Image: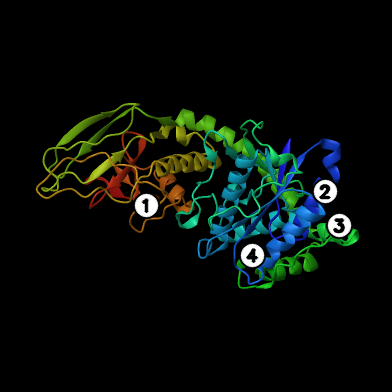
Amino acid sequence: MSYSGANIFCLQDSVCLLQALVDLQPLWGWRLGVIHCDHGWRAESGANADFVRDLVERQLGLPCYVQAAAPGTVPNEHSAREWRYRVFAEMAITYGYDVVVTGHTATDRAETMLLNLLRGSGPDGLVALARSRPLASPSIGPLLSQQAPGGNDLSGCDGSFHGATPSSSSDDSNLSHIPPRDVRVARPLLEFSRSETHEFVELLGLPYFHDITNDCNDLRRNRLRNQVMPALRQGFNPRLDQALFRFVEVLSAEMEYLAHLTDELYGKVISHACEVTVQDTSGSHSAQHYGSDGWRTHEIGGTIGAGKVNSSIRKKSGVLKLDELRQLPLAMQRRVVRKWLEAAMSEGLQSGARKHGEGGGQVRKQEPRSGNGYSGAAPSAVRYEDVARCLALLHAPNRTNSDSLCGGMVACVRNDQLVLSVPGGGAADPGGSSEA
């Protein structure tokens, strides 16, 4: 088993993790290496990288892989995290490591959970920092995009892998015998608080680097870490980190079960074959059958220029059978509807119908858009309000439409089914009414 310690900045948590891995290496026979990612945010980031390289290579005799981001490519915490995990995955695949181990603690998990809660996340969003999860596969590469921010290839955001060539004395000197493997990320320190890792490094007199950016309370996480969490520990629970860790552990198992149950119920509620009767503005009707091979829309009774057709029915994500959906508990109704909306969003559904040429033309199938964005101002993620607007149609009369949903979609009641459509210059269906 080959482990790569993702040693960010060589902070106390990372030093604690690294020392534990080194101490256990003879027992388990691990092949260890250390990754250091330099965001370039601090004037002393170069000195930090030198500190890491000296500690890892000279003092511990391990290979050290230092990656520096090109200026301006990781401007914030989110982009930095995405970049780091891409680097982890690429390094692990390139140098034959099975597991990328990070120094996240119970305190990190508690902070992440509280940040997500304060943002308004639901139960699924509160399950933060899993103990272990897939990171990359040799057949498809990193599970995140292999392009670094700004389009730089991961062969080095600044053009090279600093220190990426293993020393001749290490086990990494000949990697040709290492077969391709799936890579996972693991977080073995999740049951320990940051104060406990600090006690560990202080007790052993281990050197570590202080990141001054953690002292800046302009960042939300730092405000939570430096102001809110200490107040909660002092005023409510001195073992807050462990209490929140246990909460997330319980919640994680329950969310995993609910996700499995949602998949089962979704299969019973969803339908990929239906017949929908659509009325155009001239009053004529057209029965359209949609098969399991996808979704399609048709010109009905005239040209677009005449304004006779102004919506396209979203069929590839399927329709929901309202009679089945009504029988579910509210909690499962919400989860099924959210899964349905997310499936539609993942197809790259754009806000609004495609513009057509003057003088007419047929309504066409909407092409998926590359990337994760959606045109227009419609929200590009499923929100609580979107689910609630769909559930408000459970007992609505036929041909009732919802208000606008994420991605510019509209939910429509059609023959006791819930259908998604994309309005094109008007309501989802000219004869439908809108929910209050």
Hey, which residue is sitting farthest right in the picture?
A: 203
Q: Nearer the viewer, residue 82 or 368?
A: 82
Q: Is residue 365 left or right of residue 13?
A: left
Q: 10 Å neighbourhood of mark 4: few (<14), some, or many (≥20)?
A: some
Q: What residue is at 31 percent from the left and 26 percent from the top?
A: 291
Q: 10 Å neighbourhood of mark 3: few (<14), some, or many (≥20)?
A: some
Q: CA distance from mark 3 to mark 2?
A: 10 Å
Q: CA distance from mark 2 to mark 4?
A: 27 Å
- The image quadrant of residue 239 is bottom right
Q: Which residue position is annotated with label 1? A: 374
Q: Earlier in the sequence, mark 2 or mark 4?
A: 2
Q: Nearer the viewer, residue 120 or 276?
A: 120
Q: Earlier in the sequence, mark 3 or mark 2?
A: 2
Q: For the residue labelled by badge 1, is the local secondary structure a helix, a strand or a loop?
A: loop
Q: Which residue position is annotated with label 4? A: 221
Q: CA distance from mark 3 to mark 1?
A: 48 Å
Compared with 188, 286 (above or below) is above
Q: Are marks 2 and 1 in contact (CB under 8 Å)?
A: no
Q: For the residue labelled by badge 2, is the local secondary structure a helix, a strand or a loop?
A: helix
| Type of amino acid at the residue the image marks with label 1 | Tyr
Q: Which residue position is annotated with label 3? A: 200
Q: Are marks 3 and 4 in contact (CB under 8 Å)?
A: no
The image shows residue 158 at horizontal and vertical percentages of 54, 58
Q: Is residue 304 left or right of residue 48?
A: left
Q: CA distance from mark 3 to mark 4?
A: 24 Å
Q: Earlier in the sequence, mark 3 or mark 1?
A: 3
Q: Is residue 203 visible?
A: yes
Q: Earlier in the sequence, mark 3 or mark 4?
A: 3
Disc number placed over residue 20 in the picture, else none: 2
Number of labels in the image equals 4
